[in-house]
Amino acid sequence: MAQTTGKKSIVILGGSYAGISTAHYVLKHVLPSLDSSYEVLLVSASTQAFCRQACPRALLSDAYFPQEKLFVNIADQFTRYPPSTFRLLHATVTALDTTARTVTLSSPLSSPLSSPPSTLPFHTLVIATGATTPSPLLGLSTNDTPSLRAHWAAFRAALPSALTIVIAGGGPSGVEVAGELGAHLNPPSWRDYLPILSAPPAPRVAITLVTSAPHLLPHLRPSIAATAEGYLARLGVTVVKSTRVVEAEAVGGRTRVVLSGGREVEADLYVPCLGTVPNTGFVANKGLLAADGRVRTNPKTLRVDGAGKGARVYAVGDASDFARPAVHSALAAVPVLGANMKRDLLGVEDGEDRAFEEETREMQLVPIGPGKGVGAVMGYRVPSWFVWLLKGRDYWLWTTGGTWSGKQFEKE
């Protein structure tokens, strides 16, 4: 069992984009300004970090991405720091007490790392526990990657015999999963994208994408959504709008999907892409949570004001309500959190806190298969080739090396 060191612990909960980035930033730009009595403890339920955005394509085959880049060992990303300043604890957070200033941790049954103490005191706390997807195909729904890979393996085994697939959710995940499945199972030729000259091809596999909204991709303008729907049609995907999936029940190896209005669809495979649920079940004080379950966070300073003045509790990423959930928002917020944490730890009272400003202009890139995509950047619609260049060719995998290693935050 790992022992407490007697140091003032800056505890960061969460081993993905927000948590790992915050740990690097604090180690690089906050700890050097403090005395040697501080250490950073990163608590992660998984020993590996991975590019979750790549799941829509990665779930189809390991051949699409180099696995050593898709999954990286978290401990390896922090070897540059002295052991006296950083520790990684492989554990799940089960309780938080902001009055006693402790978190309760549950150690995995089998961990390659030392088991942490069951109760961990903190001097400073960052909640960056992220969110869980409703489908086990699209993220780490359990403590580590073997479960995700097992779900991928079962899905891949079922694909060759699947003739009907239903996907629930018309946001980016649903559209991307539909596009990747369509391209994989109903591969188009260049003629299929010619306007007017041809009707959408008859698909080998019938793929249905169901959305409760009047159009796909609600954070993008309707004209962009219409283009996305056209691309999906060329991949054998039928979009059903203004309709909800009210029930999905496994029956004899298939799934009975009940839609609003009473219509039923029998699917060989069913993939729910209905947003995410924040990983904040360990927060017993519901006064710290917003109605959607995310931690109430000051959107400017990233402090959790409800924990009390001077509590040194912060939140960032999908577990926080500081901004609309998005990786780019979390990464942009990390330096703000770090700067304000430094002010708090140094006891600086004069001057102003550093303030975070959310990017609220239309901004989303959505690949549709390996060759097409739609989106907007800073309010401007971008062409399909631009979506492919930035995201569609490898789903941001080209950016993760700098994030996991901390190189993205070399400068303060």
Image (cartoon, rainbow, N blue to C red):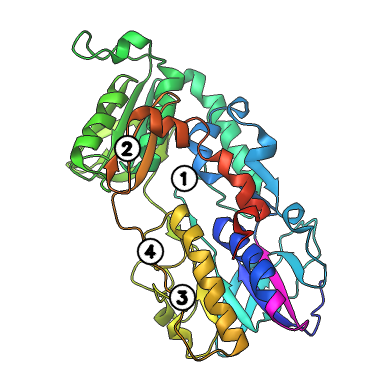
Q: Can residue 133 be seen in this view?
A: yes
Which type of secondary structure does the marked residue at label 1 adopt? loop
Which residue is the site of mark 4?
Answer: 323
Query: Which mark's residue is nearer the viewer, 1 or 4?
Result: 4
| Cα gap from disc 1 to disc 2, whole angstroms | 15 Å
Identify the residue at horizontal 36%, vertical 63% (top origin).
358
Q: Nearer the viewer, mark 4 or mark 2?
A: 4
Neighbour class for label 2 at 10 Å: few (<14), some, many (≥20)? many
Report the residue at 65% width, 84% height from top.
123
Which label's residue is closer to the chain start, 1 or 2?
Answer: 1
> Can residue 162 be spotted in the picture?
no
Q: In this view, does 316 lie to the left or right of 169?
A: right
Q: Quadrant of residue 180?
A: top left
How many residues crowd around disc 1 within 10 Å: few (fewer than 14), some, or many (20 or more)? some
Q: Quadrant of residue 45?
A: bottom right
**Quadrant where the N terminus is found in the figure:** bottom right
Task: Indicate which label's residue lies in the foreground, 1 or 2.
Answer: 1
Marks 3, 1: nearer the viewer? 3
Report the side of 314 relative to 207 (left or right): right
Task: Say whether disc 2 or disc 3 marks the residue closer to the N-terminus.
Answer: 2
The percent position of residue 116, horizontal first and vertical second, equals: 75, 70
The residue indicated by pointer 2 is 257
Work out how far the residue at label 2 is from the one at label 3, CA to CA, in angstroms.
49 Å
Q: What residue type is labelled 2?
A: Val
**Disc 1 or 4, which lies upstream in sequence?**
1
Q: Give the range drawn in magenta.
A: 32-44
| Helix, strand or loop for disc 3 | loop
